[in-house]
Every structure is written in C-alpha cells, then in structure tokens.
Image: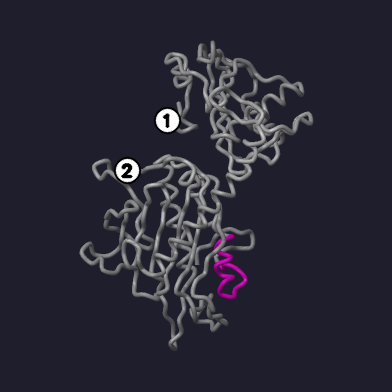
C-alpha cells in the first residue's frame, strides 16, 4: 500500500492488507466505523490525524476492521454522497487543529452500492506540533508503534525545536556550498573566476530528516535534469552524487553549466550568466534567468516525483560575481539601470509544498522573481500581468 501513489490505491490494495495480515503501526491505523458527530467523536478524530502529522505521517483507513491490531475485513462504511463526505472530512481536518494542517489527502474507495472505504493520508507536518481545538481540548498528540498518546513535555520541546533545526541545517548547507562555488571548487569549474553565475538549489526537507541514499544505476535508466539552459548533458560521478554538465564531453576543464543530484536528494544547478551590452555595459537579462530557473524547477520536481522524494522543498536562488552588473528591463528603450553594489545576491528561501508546482512553476516562483528584480532596482518581474499570471516575454 505504501509503495503506491495515493491516487492509485484501489480496493485490491485494501484487501491485500487483510490477506497479508498487515498490522497497525506508527503510520497505519484502521477504523471499522465512521467517527460520530458528537464533540468527543470529533475530538477523537482530530487527535488521530494530528498524532500522525506530529510524528512521521501515515494513513488512517476508515472502513477496514481489525482484530488485535491486524487488518481482518474490508467491511466499508456507508454514505449516499461520497464526494460530500470527502469534503466534510477535509474541512474538519482544516478547522479542528491549531496551527491548521494543510498537507493531507482524502479519498473514497468504492466497494459496492453505497459502501466504501475512506482513506486519509497525513503528511509529516513541518508546522508541528499541532494541537486539538475541538471542544476546548487543546492537547497535543503524537503517534508511535503503540498508537497515539498525549505529547509529554520533552516530546513537545523536541517538536518545537525540530523545524527550526532543519531550517538552520538548510541555511548552513547553502552558505557552505556558495563558498565552494564562489571559489570555483565544485565538481567542475563554471567559467573563469569572478564570472557572474547563477546557483539554484532545491532542498527536500526529507534530505535532512530521513535516511535518503539515492542510487545512480545507468543500467536502470537513471534520469537527471540537464544543466540550466542546456539541450543535452554529459554524466559523471562525484563524491556528492551524480553530475551532468553541458558542452562537449571531452571539454570539462571549464563548462558553461552543471547540475548535481546529491545522494541525499538535494539538487543543485550552477550556470554562467551571459554578461554584455552596448557601450561596454555589463548587463544580464533576468527574463532569461527566470525561464532557466522555471525550467530547472520543472525538471527537478519531476525527478523527485519519479524517485518518490516527498515535499516540502526549499528553493534557494543566488547570484554570485554580480558586483557592477545591471539588469535592464529593455536595453533598447534606454531605461534606467542600477548596477548591483554587492558581489553576491542571496534571495530569500521559497518553500514549495507539493510536486504539483511542476505543472506551472512560474506561478509558484513569482515572489522569488519579484525579489530578484528588486535586487537590481526594479519594482518587480515584468513577466506577469496584473492578475499575477506569467507571460513569457
């Protein structure tokens, strides 16, 4: 069941839980019947879903009976309006906890007639801990191998510190990598020392919380997004993971761009920025940079989905070697340009909560693009209309 995407789970997968004698555990709980509508029932439901979100996530399966904690029968529950039930359960999850839980899925799996199973997938929450607010309960719950229980003082302390510790590790990773790349000491040199370069990193939170160790087997058809702006790539291995670089395979002393998929799932793309302009100006064209970033994000998130590396992801975009560089909106209209006074621009972190952002990454990336243009003296990205819709220029 866990090996499948949530949308692909079917009745046969539920029956397999029974046939194989799958027990409840830290990430799986069975319920034979609907939760009731009384305050105590609603409180119990909120406690069950929050306990999973406060731990490592998991599945709550309503309509599967258990005997001594082991799945025994796919009996199902009855409803005349499955879609309405899914909406009601989703609304209950959103309104019964503080802070609200946003990352979850609810699905109805039909058996026959009006009977079916309600499957709920709770993701591990990065806003944990969440407390129950139904009927003024205000307790925090967590789930382990023996079920859920109210969180102890020590468990609460760890939960509050957990998210901030992960964020600090991500920031430290970024700082260390930028120092390496600024000195052109990565797996390959990009341009000459001092050249303007774009550095983009996509960091799954799971890379710093789970034991991710990717394998790169060419015989298994290993895929990897090409370097930014490249129509092809050459693969090579490094101590960090799998590297792909642009240009002729034999010319690797210095390259225009390369990308790295680290063994822990972090993705990094480095590319030389084209700097030029009339009358000796040092200009870069940020609309092209936007397109390169969006294309890279689309490929990276697609690779994460293929490899089942879960969201959320933190996107980190930096420009290095840009002191004295300008970014005109339109060079030929003579608009004012503002040279950058810093050699390094580190844009704020952008969090992506779902792989679905790969469909139209430009919409998700708008806040980041606006800030990138701000760094060069402009109001925001000119690549969006008044409604915020991306328009390729």
Which label is found at residue 215?
Answer: 2
Q: Secondary structure at mark 1?
A: loop
Where is 148 relative to 155, above or below? above
Outermost residue on the front side: it is 154
Outermost residue on the right side: it is 136
- Left or right of residue 244, residue 377 in this image: right
Which residue is found at the position 59% from the left and 75% from the top?
A: 377
Over which residues does the magenta segment extend?
A: 367-382
* Front residue (pair 114, 376): 376
Residue 178 counted in the magenta span: no
Which label is found at residue 244?
Answer: none
Q: Secondary structure at mark 2?
A: loop
Residue 370, position as x, y percentages in the image: 58, 65
Residue 256, position as x, y percentages in the image: 33, 68
Which residue is found at the position 61% from the left and 16% from the top?
A: 77
Outermost residue on the bottom side: it is 279
């Amino acid at each position: 069941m866990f090996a499948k995407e949530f949308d692909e789970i079917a009745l046969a997968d539920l029956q397999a839980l029974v046939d194989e004698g799958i027990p409840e555990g830290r990430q799986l709980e069975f319920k034979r019947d609907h939760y009731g509508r009384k305050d105590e029932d609603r409180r119990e439901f909120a406690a069950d879903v929050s306990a999973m979100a406060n731990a490592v996530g998991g599945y709550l399966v309503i309509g599967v009976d258990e005997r001594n904690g082991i799945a025994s029968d796919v009996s199902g529950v009855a409803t005349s309006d499955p879609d309405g039930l899914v909406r009601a359960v989703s609304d209950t999850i959103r309104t019964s906890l503080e802070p609200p839980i946003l990352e979850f899925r609810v699905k109805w799996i039909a058996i026959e007639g009006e009977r079916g199973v309600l499957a709920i997938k709770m993701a591990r929450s990065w806003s944990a801990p969440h407390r129950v607010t139904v009927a003024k309960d205000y307790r925090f719950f967590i789930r382990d191998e023996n079920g859920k229980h109210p969180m102890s003082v020590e468990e609460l302390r760890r939960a509050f510190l957990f998210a901030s510790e992960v964020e600090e590790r991500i920031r430290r990773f970024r700082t260390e990598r930028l120092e390496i790349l600024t000195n052109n000491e990565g797996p390959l040199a990009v341009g000459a020392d001092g050249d303007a370069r774009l550095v983009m990193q996509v960091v799954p939170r799971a890379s710093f919380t789970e034991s991710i160790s990717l394998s790169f087997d060419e015989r298994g058809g290993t895929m990897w997004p090409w370097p930014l702006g490249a129509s092809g790539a050459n693969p090579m291995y490094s101590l960090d993971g799998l590297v792909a670089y642009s240009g002729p395979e034999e010319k690797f002393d210095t390259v225009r761009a390369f990308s790295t998929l680290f063994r822990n799932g972090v993705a990094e793309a480095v590319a030389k920025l084209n700097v030029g302009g009339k009358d000796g100006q040092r200009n870069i064209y940020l609309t092209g940079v936007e397109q390169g970033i969006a294309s890279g994000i689309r490929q990276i998130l697609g690779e994460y989905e293929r490899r089942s590396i879960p969201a959320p992801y933190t996107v980190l975009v930096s420009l290095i070697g840009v002191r004295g560089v300008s970014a005109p909106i339109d060079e030929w209209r003579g608009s004012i340009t503002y040279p950058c006074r810093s050699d390094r621009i580190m844009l704020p972190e952008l969090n992506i909560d779902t792989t679905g952002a790969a469909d139209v990454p430009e919409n998700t990336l708008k806040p980041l693009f606006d800030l990138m243009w701000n760094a060069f003296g402009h109001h925001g990205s000119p690549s969006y209309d008044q409604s915020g819709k991306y328009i390729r220029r």
